[in-house]
Image: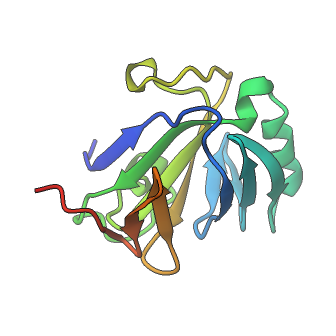
Amino acid sequence: MPDGEIFTGPVENSVNGYISFSYPAIYEGREILGIKLGFENGKVIEARADKNEDFLLKMLETDAGAKYLGEFAIGTNEKIRRFTKNTLFDEKISGTFHVALGTGFPETGSKNKSAIHWDLVCDAHSDCEIWVDDELFYKDGDFTLDFG
């Protein structure tokens, strides 16, 4: 499997804002298109989809942890150049980010537990800003902080 992501478990009550997913989400063999999620204090408070919205809403009702993020990650693999509908590849495309609804990885500090871990991938090459601790961390497919 290819490598190429930086990931963490977000503080459970820290996520605020909106995400519109540009790529289809695939879960349990179903394709969900045009997902839009709104978060307040870490919890999904608004969820819509252009296709298979009923399935999206059903997955969010799986259990209490399904409405929280267990993972936040940025894809860094420049060799993967196109969306394939194989999440293990797509989540690593350079210039994308992904979040996982549901259970998190304890080694990242995540405490969220759920029966699901559903990765949703988004193209971040344009009209994308990721802010961390009140600093612009990532904009339009590139890191903005100087790590050197």
How many numbered callouts? 0
**Which percent across, then down, holds residue 115?**
68, 22
Side of 112 relative to 138 (left or right) = right
Which quadrant does the C terminus fall into? bottom left
- Whether 109 is drawn above or below 19: the answer is above
Please tell me which residue is depicted at 47% across the width and 81% down the height of the picture: 126
Q: Position of residue 25 (x, y in %)?
A: 63, 55
The residue under the point 66% across, 29% down is 116
Quarter holding the N terminus is top left
What residue lies at 47% left-to-right and 33% top-to-bottom? 9
Tell me: residue 71, above or below residue 81. Answer: above
- Asked if residue 55 lies left or right of residue 109, the reply is right
Q: Position of residue 18 (x, y in %)?
A: 68, 61
* Residue ranking furthest to the right: 54
In the image, residue 71 above or below residue 73: above
Query: Residue 24: horizontal and vertical position, in percent?
Result: 63, 62
User: With 119 as the anchor, is 45 left or right in this view?
Assistant: right
Residue 28, image quadrant: top right
**Residue 120 in view:** yes
Give the colour scheme of this rendering. rainbow
Q: Nearer the viewer, residue 78 or 8?
A: 8
- The furthest residue to the bottom: 126
The answer to whether one can see residue 86 in this image is no
Foreground pick, 11 / 32 = 11
Which residue is at the far front? 134
